Image (cartoon, grey):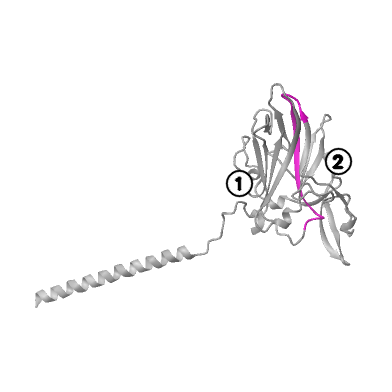
Amino acid sequence: MKRRHIFLIAVLTLVVFAATIFAACDELSRETNGAQNAVIPSNTDTLSEDPGASGGTDADPASQNDDEADGGSVVETGFTLSATVSESSPLAISWDRETLATSLSSSVGLNGLNILIPSNSSVGTSFGEIVYQEVYCYPANGELVFRDPESLSPYIFDREEKTSFLLSNRSQGSQVSNLRVQAAFECESGGERALSALRVGIFKKNNSGNFTLQGVLAPTPAEDNVAYGTVTSGASVNTISMGRSVREVSLGSVSSQGEVECMVVVWLDAAAYDDMAVKKAMRVSLLFVA
């Protein structure tokens, strides 16, 4: 009898142990399946969300210009602009004369892209003579009118305190006869309406030391899609002047071992911006070719 009791006790102990192991494995399996089936917010888009969307402000200025002189990677914080020279050209690009590179990049939060109208968009106008006004449109009596204009700066492509960059001709004996800049525009899915209002002004330093407008680039170039002029609150949007945007801007020639200094400004065209548009992460890639 004693042996039978011992045997039964051993069997019961094994059964309880096996049941405990089975229950633990089942719980682990359910937790694993639950983790696999959970909905995970996507962070894998090529372009990131606006960092200010959660109620914050623009990215910290130190991180907005997290670029490196040799074209290092940039954390995309909403709007990213890059400038690259064509591999087939003798050009180099740099923030200063000491460090030549093939590309530059800079970023800013989407709140740094202001909805503006410049006072002038004519080629040859000095940057210092242009006043940019932030203004919104709203419907009144069956038409869109401007509301509460206020002077505000556009986004300037920069690195720390440098707001202009150099394009250098490294050739020892040949000049670059036709330097020009082209642009590619991209946005995160859902931000196409805001992207369509993006305008990129290209300025070049002249012999007098002034940066003068060479042209305005846009995602969809047209003869009449760059709003400019003096804005009056309550005036119809239809009364504003409209200038030309282009697909390519010419910067002229660069002598052997010579250079040109450029400045790039970016804004959202107030006459083209839809208040219902959603600002998603955007990128402009400038390519300088010769």
147 versus 123 height, above or below: below
Q: Identify the residue under disc 2.
A: 129
Decide if residue 55 is in sight here: no
Circle 1 residues within 10 Å: few <14, some 14–19, many ≥20? some
**Image quadrant containing the C terminus:** top right
* Bounds of the magenta segment: 253-273
Residue at left offset 34%, top offset 67%: 24
Q: Is 185 in front, or is 138?
A: 185
On residue 75, the disc is: 1
Quarter of the image where one finds residue 41 = bottom right
Residue 150 coordinates in the image, percent (x, y): 83, 52
Quarter assignment of residue 252: top right
Q: Main secondary structure of the magenta part?
A: strand
Q: Position of residue 169 (x, y in %)?
A: 71, 28
Q: In the image, is residue 227 above or below residue 251?
A: below
Looking at the image, which is closer to me, 221 or 161?
Answer: 221
Which of pointers 2 and 1 lies earlier in the amino acid sequence?
Answer: 1
Residue 91 placement (x, y as % from top left): 68, 31
Label 2 with label 1: CB-CB less than 8 Å: no
